[in-house]
Amino acid sequence: MRDIGKNIFNLREQKRLTQEELADKLFVTRQTVSNYEHGKTRPDVDMIMRIADILNVDANAVFYGIPVPESRKTAFRRMMVSSIVLLMMAVGAIILHPLCLSLQAEKYITTPSFLMSMFYDPILMLVLGWWIMQGIGVVMQTKGLNKPWTKKARRTVMIVLLLCFVLELPYAIWSVIVLIESVTAGIVQMSFPYVPVYQEIVSFIMKVDIRCPAAYALFGGLLWIFGFPQTGEAAETDSHR
C-alpha cells in the first residue's frame, strides 16, 4: 500500500491500457490518472475498488502491488488444524451418540440427545463444510472471495448462525433444568412456556437440526467462500472499505 500509484501504473501496463483509456473507463480525466500514478494524489477506497474492477484484479493488487494468494504452507496448516478438530469432533460424536441413545432407551432421559442435536451435530457439520471447501482450495490452489461485499456476506452468515443457536438456548436451559429436577425430585411435569412466533421459529430450527443437520455444512462452505477466517492482509483490506 506504500506505492499505490506505481501499482496502478504496472497493472495498467499489464492490461495494455493507456492513461486516457483507463481514465475513460473511470470517468475521470487523463491528468487524474497521471496524478495517481505519479503519487501527486491518492485515490480513495471507492476509486481503488473501481480501478481493481476495471483492471479485473483483486483490490489487493492495487493496495499491495500483486495479488498475494494464501500461501500453500498456510493453506496446508489450516487444513491440518481443521482436520484434527474435525477428527476429534467426529470421534466425540461416535462415542457420545450411543451413550445418549442408551440413556434415552433405558432411562428415558432425552436431554443429552436433545442437546447433541441442537448444538454438537450442527457445529460438526459446520466444521465439515468448511473443511471440504478448504480441501478443494488446497487442491485447486484457490481461496475464498475478497470482494467489497464479502465482508457483509460473511457477517450475515455468522449472524444467522449465531441467532439460530441463541434462539435455541432457552430450550436447552429448560431441558437441563427439567433433567435436574427429574433426577433430584423424581418425575416432574414441566412444559416450556408458549411464546407466539418464537415457538414457531425455534421449532423450525430444531427440525432442521434433527432431520437435516447436514444443512449446516452449507453454512460452513459459505463461510469459507466469504473468506472466513480472515488473513491479516484481508482484514487490513476490509478495514479500508
Image (cartoon, rainbow, N blue to C red):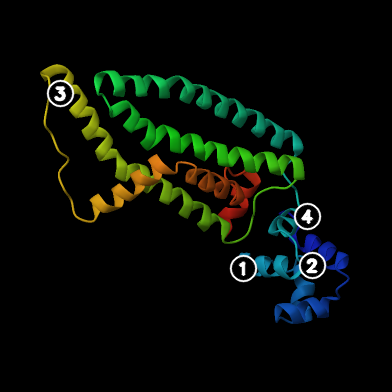
Badges 4 and 3: C-beta atoms under 8 Å apart? no
Q: Compute the Cα span from label 4 to label 1.
A: 17 Å
Which callout, 3 or 2, points at the residue further toward the start of the chain? 2
Badges 4 and 1: C-beta atoms under 8 Å apart? no
Q: Is residue 25 visible?
A: yes
Front residue of 142/120: it is 120
The answer to whether 104 is drawn above or below residue 216 in the figure is above
Which callout, 2 or 4, points at the residue further toward the start of the chain? 2
Q: Compute the Cα span from label 2 to label 4.
A: 13 Å
- Label at residue 65: 4
Q: Residue at x 49, y 42 (%)?
A: 214
Please name which of the two marks, 3 or 1, marks the residue nearer to the observer: 3
Residue type (three-letter) at the residue carrying disc 2: Glu
Q: Compute the Cα span from label 1 to label 2.
A: 17 Å
Badges 1 and 2: C-beta atoms under 8 Å apart? no
Residue type (three-letter) at the residue carrying disc 1: Asp
Q: Residue at x 64, y 55 (%)?
A: 146
Residue type (three-letter) at the residue carrying disc 3: Glu
Residue type (three-letter) at the residue carrying disc 4: Gly
Task: Tell me: 125 left or right of 225.
Answer: left
Sort mark 2 into few (<14), some (14-19) or many (20+) by Cα contacts within 10 Å.
many
Which callout, 1 or 2, points at the residue further toward the start of the chain? 2
Name the residue that disc number 1 marks. Answer: 46
> Where's residue 74, x and y in %?
70, 35
Quadrant placement of the C terminus: bottom right
Name the residue that disc number 2 marks. Answer: 37
**Label 2 element class:** helix
